[in-house]
Image (cartoon, rainbow, N blue to C red):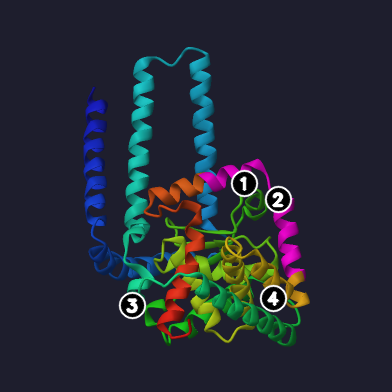
Amino acid sequence: MKFGKKRRNWFIVLLLLVIALAVFGFSRPRVETDFSTGWYPSFSVVQRNITGWIPFSVGDIIYLIVFLSILFAVIRFVNKAISRKLNRRALVASLGKWVLTLLAVYIIFQSFWGLNYNRQGIAFQLRLEKPRYDTAALLKLQTFLLGQVNSSKEELNVSEKGYPENREIFNRGTAVYHQAAISFPFLQYSPASIKSSLFGKAGNYLGFTGYYNPFTGEAQVNTTVPRFLIPIITAHEMAHQLGYAKENEASFVGYLVSTTADDPYYRYSAYLDLFFYVNAQVSEFDTLATQQAISQLDEGVKADIKEWRDFALAHRTFISKATTWLYGKFLVWFNQPEGIKSYDAVVALVISYYQKQGFL
C-alpha cells in the first residue's frame, strides 16, 4: 500500500504540472516572449552543444532502446495474460506505471520544445498580414517559381560537379542560416547538431524525410531520398531546432533562408519543393495552367521530378498511409487543425511575405 500511495502522489504532482503547462500555453504572447524567445533558445543551444559533436544520432539510439523496451514489456504482459498470472492488482499496477510514464514524457516534451506549437511564430516576427489568398496570387506565384526553378537548376549545373556528401550538405545548411541571420537576426543558428537518420531506409516506407528530436536537440535527415531534396529537408529540420514547431512555419523558414542565400543547391531544392506545393493547389481550379507550368520546366528538372515520383511510388505502402494518418492526428492534437495538410499552408505564408514585399 505504501508504494501505491507514493504512486498516487506522483500522479497528482505530474497531473498538476500538465495542467500548469496547459494554462501557460493558452497565452500565445506569453509563450512567445517567455518560452520561444526566452527560455528555449538558451536551452536548445545547450542541447546542441551536448549532441552536436557526436557523429551519429543519439536520439535515434534512444528511440530504438525505448521501442525495444516497449516491445519487450508488451510481450511480457501478453505472456502473463495468457498464462493467467496477471491478476487485477498487477493489471492496475502496470497501467499506473504506464500512465505515470506517459505524463512524465509529455511534461518533458512540452517543457523542452512542445510549447513552441503555441507561439505566435514567424508571421508575428515578420509582421505578416493575412494574405489575399486568391487564384491570381497563386498563378503569379507559380509563374515566379517556374522561372526560379529553371534558373536555379541551370546555375546548379554550372557551379556544381555533383551532389555533395551529407556532411557538406549539413555544413552548408549552417552557412545558409548564418547568411539569412544578417537580415533576420532571430534565425541565428549555432551550434549545429544535424545527423543522418539511422532509420532512413525504413523511413522511405514509413513516409518520413526528416524529424526533430526534442529530447536531444538533434535534427535528423533521411539522406536516402533523392539528393536534390536533402537541402530543403535539412533547412526545414533546422527551423524546428530554432523553435518553429508548426510544419508550415518550419517549411517557410526553410524556404526563406534557402532562397535568400547564395548556395545554388539550397536555392534549387527550396524552389522546386515550393513549386510543387503551389502547382498542386493551382490544379484544384485550373488543371490547364498546372500542365502548362510543368511543360515549361527545364529537362533536367523534369528528370529530377521523374526520379522523385519513381522513388515515392516504389516505397508507397499501406504502412506509409497509416503513419501519415497518425502523424496528421498528432498535428491536430498540437494546435494544427489542418493535420497533414499543415505542410500545404506554407503557401499562405509565402504569399503573405511576397505581398508585404510588394511582389504579389
Structural distance between the alpha carbons of marks 1 and 2: 8 Å
Residue 52 in view? no
The residue mark sitting in front, 3 or 4, is 3
Q: Amino acid at mark 4?
A: Pro
Residue 36, position as x, y percentages in the image: 32, 66
State left or right for residue 288 relative to residue 238: right
Q: Chief secondary structure of the magenta span?
A: helix
Q: Is residue 305 magenta?
A: yes
The residue identified by callout 4 is: 164
Residue at the extreme top of the image, as rendered? 84
> Image point 22% across, 52% down: which residue?
23
Count residues near mark 1 (Cα–Cα under 10 Å), then give few for <14, some for 14-19, many for 20+. Answer: some
In the picture, which quadrant includes the N terminus? top left
The segment highlighted magenta reads: 303-325
Tag shown at residue 112 = none
Quarter where residue 356 is shown: bottom left
Tag shown at residue 127 = 3
Tag shown at residue 320 = 1
Q: Amino acid at mark 2?
A: His
Residue 275, position as x, y percentages in the image: 60, 71
Structural distance between the alpha carbons of marks 4 and 1: 29 Å
